[in-house]
Image (cartoon, coloured by chain):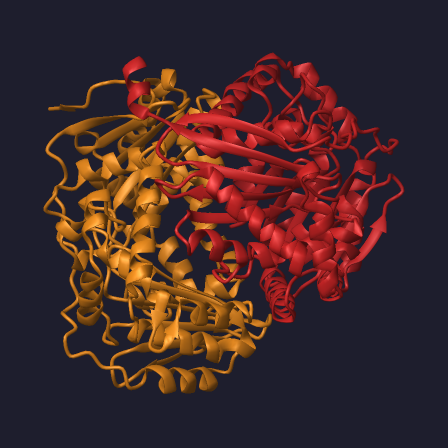
Amino acid sequence: MTNSTRTTLPNGLTVILKEVHSAPIISWWVAYRVGSRNEPTGKTGISHWVEHMMFKGTERFPAGLLDREIDRAGGMWNAFTFMDYTMYFETVPADKAGIAMAAEADRMNNAIFDPGETESERTVIISERQGAENEPTFWLQEAVQGAAFRVHGYHHRIIGDESDLRSMTRDDLYAHYRHHYCPANAAVVAVGAFDTDEMLAKVNELFGSIDARERPALFVRHEPPQQGERRVNVERPGKTAFCEICHHAPPATHEDWVKLKVMDNILSGSSGASDNKTSRLYQALVKTEIAASVGAWLLPTIDPFLYSIMITLREGRSAEEAEATVLAEIARLQADGITEAELNRARKQAKAAFAYSTEGVTEQAYWLAQSFILEDESWFDGFVDRLTDVALDDVQDVANRYLIPQRRVVGILHPTDPEAETASA
Amino acid sequence: MTASNLSIPNSNNIRRIVLDNGITLLVYENPNGQSVNVMGSLHAGSIYESPESSGLSAYVASALMTGAGSRDFDDIHSALEDNGADLSVRGHIHKIGLSGKALAEDLRLLLETANDILRNPVFPQDHVERLRGEKLTWLQYSNFDTRYRAAKAMREALYPPSHPYHYGAFGNEETIKRISQRDLQAFHRTHFGPRGMILVIVGAVAPKDAADLVQDNFGDWQNAHQPEVLSAPLANSPACSQRQAVFVPGKTQSDISMGVIGPARRADDYLAAQLANSVLGEFGMMGRIGKSVREDKGLAYYAFSRVSGGHGPDPWTINAGVNPDNVDLAIDSILEEIEILVSDEVSDEDLADNQSYFTGRLPLRLESNEGIASSIHSMQSYGLGLDYLANYRELIYEIGKADLLAAARRYLKQEQMVIAVAGPQQEASGTND
């Protein structure tokens, strides 16, 4: 992906534009450099809650108006909060982008945070958390993250802890908004059918008048090195056991990250292009009937996060057996490395995944916004080239340095007898 | 058709070919991008299986790629994965669906693989057993999923055991344990064939090249045993409203699934029902239901409605996830909104908003190869005509407020509604006369 332009307005706002004229559509994104990683204890979940409150309106764009206008235009809109960022987007027919841009400019500075709306949204967010709690793996992942990060904000889930969701006030939320939502802490990204000069002029007109402020200081606590393997056990009613095996990984901008990405592709096949039934872990766990499924994640994050492998056990098979199998595959990788054929497959899959993910303007805009959060748009533009440059020895090397007990956290979800739960209910 | 419709797939720019053996091929060249998407279907869904073998069709679908002809599991998947290509087959109620994507240079690989797995599957015994274990694990997991359990209870109460929609496409633990390799082979032998098959190819490929590849691969496929296409029987609505309660221990939230029998895709009032549904539970932040249940009362993170509208009388459903203490309040709020929708015409603004929403979203639906392929497949599968999208705007703007009211009144009858709740609360199921 090439040909995006980057401009910084005098008030500090980053503007990233890319013309794509394959369809009469524009995808319009605003990304803020704040997420759950920046939340102290007592305020967990505040970034996500603020994201919800941004849909409660401004004086100029009252609650519901933007939703209605975007839908009326046949657009698609949403927002999401991640550990490192909060993003808002609207993908709309090109001639209807103006309202989305105007609304985003307005709510960067003028969101109301009505006290009554704040209370109403409190129960919605608690409901969102309770819905997630219905999934057994939510509890497991929460426990594993908590064990992996004692100090850093990656310790808690994005949704936040229920006690904080019950105790935070409207003023807490508004203070978080005022501190983090400003031009110097944000980027606007547009991809689609427009003229770059005209779009930049429009962005300047809408966002240029927002007061400049210093880029806000972000709350970040660095995680000290882990001093040995950590383990957690979780029990939930049900019939299905899960095992999650994590290793502390480098940030996305670290030179080792892309090497681990290739390693992940070979271990789990998580390229996004196909379901990879020839991957090493599928062959070792699913084909051998130990597990019903296996997946892995290496997320591109600002700070060091985790490389996670999640295994869904088949009935009658144990998590310990699955863990031993994964560790044996890791040992094989560390001892013998990978083959040329595996490396070539990873490269071809990366090329295909990149082609698929850049055919839509929404995906392209997302990746540009994500790149801004991590570094700059070169992070994604150069992704396939960096991945292609990974050598055979690099993969073995990172496996030996990262997939070690001192960086490992293992979580096991043990299903408990639902009948016992029924009897005590 | 007007000049502005030229970029919309239509009868002039979709290459449609019916092969001698009955396969309908539709190709749409989209030079934007480097990939190609293949989408297809065969009349071999769960409607062709008995209740005793519920899940058989989907089992066949998931086993097709475990061995075909002389190629074993690893051969099939290596060929695809080495090239970043993807191919999957999935069972539905009426049809088996095929979906694949690859870089355009690998279309031949995709079609050769699809041809092999659809025509020459081996169903190796070891993989049949492996898949059985995976399916049982998934079913056991789903039994503790409140959303799955609420939807299942609603469906089973809405459609009687004599109707194919009473059963899910994926079977149950009892039937999955019973299905044998021989059952899979027999179902495939009888139901898989070219007659009625649809194949759509969209992407950076010339129509003639795509057509030649399809002819080379599928042109000689024959199956004299293929039965006639089955239609879903009409479904009688329940005689009275019902409330189903499913106890799922250890959960913090309850899921509500409310349903009535809705319109089929070909029903005259299908689009009117879709517009009415959008007003009720889709437009903006989940329509009027979202405004009441989520925005005004703060009861739920999600509360929305949906008209399924497939080949038969699929349900019109409303779903919400709420704290167990708020179940009755949420249900009452939803019923109030339904009552308003069936009592009064929507406003001019509501109608205009939703018509604009329906027509305005076409460019987004048609942005990707996958979206284009899905739209073309729907036009062919439901017999809508290849100019359906080109004429879509006219169809939507022909619908008036009275049509929405009539559709809502015809389907959204509270006295025939099934309300299922799955969660940690223990309550009794019952009927209301």
Tell me the colour chain B is drawn in. Answer: orange
Q: Nearer the viewer, residue A316 or A159?
A: A316
- Could you tell whether B177 is left or right of A135 in the image? left
Q: Nearer the viewer, residue B204 or B423?
A: B423
Chain letter, red in picture: A
- Could you tell whether A110 is left or right of A212 in the image? left
Residue depicted at 46% across the width and 54% down the height: B359
Q: Position of residue A134 (x, y in %)?
A: 43, 29
**Which quarter of the figure is the N terminus of chain B placed in?**
bottom left
Q: Nearer the viewer, residue B338 or A408?
A: A408
Work out whether A55 lies above or below B72: above
Q: Position of residue B208 (x, y in %)?
A: 45, 86
Work out whether A124 lies above or below A332: above
Would residue B177 be visible to someone looking at this image?
yes
- Could you tell whether A163 is left or right of B403 in the image? right
Would residue B345 be visible to someone looking at this image?
no
- Could you tell whether B418 is left or right of A356 in the image? left
**Which quarter of the figure is the C terminus of chain B placed in?**
top left
Residue depicted at 61% across the width and 12% down the height: A167
Residue depicted at 65% across the width and 60% down the height: A336
